[in-house]
Amino acid sequence: MEGEVLRDDQWEHIRPFVPGGRKGKRGPRSDGRRFVDALLWMARSGARWRDLPERFGPHQTAKRRYYRWIEAGVFDRLFEAVAGDPDLEWMMLDATVIRAQAQAAGARRKKGGPEAQALGRSRGGFGTKLHAVVDALGLPVRFEVGPGQQNDMAPACDLVEGLPAAQVIADRAYDADRLHDIILDQGGEPVIPPRRHRKYQHGYDKVAYKNRWRIEGFFAKLKQWRRIATRYDKLAAHFLGFVKLASIMLWLKSLNCHYSLGCLNQ
C-alpha cells in the first residue's frame, strides 16, 4: 500500500527543525526524511507498526523514535514552524468525536491516569473528542483532546486565548459569557448564535457565520488519515502526534499553493 511522501520543497521547509541527520564518522546518523515518510505511511494507512514496509527500516526503531519525538516536543516545533502566520480575519472553533478501537483502552497505570488517555463514552460510543481552532483559510491553529463525553466548552477559552482574531465563529454550544468576554477583550467579535434558553437573545453576524463550514471541512480532511479517523493509540499524546503530523502536511500544501500563486502573479 503506497502512502503519502514528502516532496523536495516540503522537506526543505521542515528540514532545519528535524532532529538528527548530522554526519558522524560513518555517515549520517539517521535519515530524518525517510522517518517522516514512514510516519506519513502509518498515518495514511492506519496500519500497525509491525506492518511498516521494510523500506522504512525496522518498525521497532521507528516506533521508539516517534515516542521520543513526542516527549521532546518535536511535532510542536514543526507545527509552529509551518503554522506561524495564520490568517486571523476569521477564526473557527469546534470539536469532533473520534471513535476509538478497543485496543486503545488499557494503558498501563504508570503511563498516566484518565487524563493521559483522554478516552470516554458518549452517544457516539467509546472514543475521544478533538477540539480545534482553524484560521480563515480553514488551516489548523490549535488543538486539544479530551474524553468523548467532554463538554465542547471545557477547553474553549484556553484555545482562543492569545489569538486576537477579528471574528470568532462557533455554533451555539459555545455561547457562554466567559468565552464572549475573552474574545471581546482581545478586540474581536464573537459570531456565536445565542442559546435558546437565554433571556436576552443577542445578535450575531449571520453572513460571517456561514464560514463555519471551514472547520467542518478541516475535520473532513483530517479524517481522511485512517490513523486519525479511528484512534488506535493508548495515550492521547501519541494520538495527537499523528493529528499534528497531518496538520503539518495541510500547512505545507497550502504554503506550496501560496508560492505557486505568487509565481503566477509575477
Image (cartoon, grey):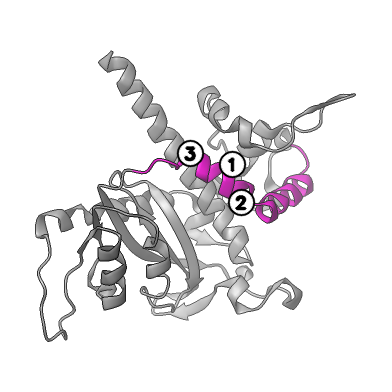
User: Which residue ends up furthest to the right in the rendered image?
Assistant: 25
Q: Which residue is mark 2?
A: 47
Q: Is residue 148 visible?
A: yes
Q: Residue at x 73, y 51 (%)?
A: 68
Q: Which residue is mark 3?
A: 82
Name above or below for residue 201 compared with residue 44: below
Q: Is residue 165 left or right of residue 8?
A: left
Which one is earlier in the sequence, the residue at label 3 or at label 1?
Answer: 1
Which one is earlier in the sequence, the residue at label 1 or at label 2?
Answer: 1
Give the residues in magenta.
57-86
Q: Secondary structure at mark 1?
A: helix
Q: Which residue is mark 1?
A: 41
Find out whether the residues at labels 3 and 1 contact each other: C-beta distance under 8 Å.
no
Name above or below for residue 228 compared with residue 247: below
Q: Residue at x 26, y 77 (%)?
A: 177
Residue 189: % across, % down: 20, 60
Which one is earlier in the sequence, the residue at label 2 or at label 3?
Answer: 2
Q: Is residue 223 left or right of residue 6?
A: left
Determine crowd level at label 2: few under 14, some 14-19, many 20+ residues with C-alpha closer than 10 A: some
